[in-house]
Amino acid sequence: MIDLAELAKTLQTAIQDHSLFETAFTHRSYLNEHHAVNTNSNERLEFLGDAVLQLLSSDYLFTNFPNSPEGELTNYRSAIVCTPSLAQESQRLDYGKFLLLSRGEESTGGRTREYILANTFEAVLGALYLQNGLDFCREFVKRELLYKIDDIVKEEKYKDAKSKFQELAQEKLGITPEYELVSSWGLDHEKTFKIAAKVGGKTYGEGTGKSKQKAEMEAAAEALNKLTGTGQAL
């Protein structure tokens, strides 16, 4: 089970509701192998944490960038709360070691899988909201995520990832990227989509989201991160 004492140090708060935070780290695959476990997956907490994150990041950007128009604020927010960004912070906080996963998910690298880590960041935020309230979450998000917003704005990392990826692909190869649906899961009214960003049939990035548009944007962002961060060529 989860080392709650170590988790408390990571989150900088006492863990009052043990089951709540165990749920926050329970991936749905774990329940497939542990039917007797009296808990749910972290998906409901992820839903709540996503809403808290949208509110707090929007409030922070509105207050701290008073001269930025709505469109720019939206782009700033998208860059800071996208899957690669949240996964990066989850990895820094070492959330992966607390995850409860199935053996199959564990063996295929689930503890470092980007979308799982990003979803876990939101689920933990949802748990922190239920236990500690909005003011605590505001300071938590400011400390653990929003610290990098100035760099995102300065380096223009907020610009539309699909547009930037298309410009790069057309400049280097004269080919327009394509986006391919890899998989989807969930109920019809709350599906999650996984989409690959491809150029000339080769996959350069993958993204997940509650809409195909969001998944495409995150796939393009991952492709750009790989190309610009590693020097990989198209």
Image: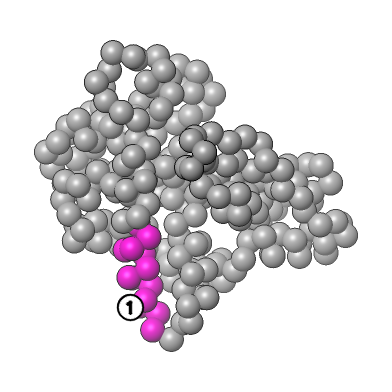
Between 77 and 226, the residue placed more toward the observer is 77
Residue occupying the point 43% across, 71% down:
150
Name the residue rendered at 35%, 55% in the picture.
51
**Residue drawn at x 20%, y 30% as measured from the top left:** 19
From the top left corner, tell me how far across and down residue 119 is, in percent.
Answer: 42, 42
| Placement of 120 over or under 138, stated as above or below | above
Question: As drawn, is 195 to the left or to the right of 96?
Answer: right
Give the side of residue 208 with respect to residue 132, left or right: right
Q: Is residue 54 magenta?
A: yes
Q: What residue sits right under mark 1 in the picture?
A: 63
Rendered location of residue 40, percent (x, y)? 30, 28
- Residue plotted at (48% across, 43% down): 189
- Kindly state the secondary structure of the residue where label 1 is placed: helix
Give the camera-side residue of 48 and 157. 48
> The disc labelled 1 sits on which kind of residue?
Thr
Would you say 221 lies left or right of 74 here? right
Residue 108, quarter of picture: top right
Give the main secondary structure of the magenta stretch: helix
| Magenta segment boundaries in residue numbering | 53-66
Is 44 magenta? The answer is no
Circle 1 packing at 10 Å, graded few (<14), some (14-19), many (20+), is: few
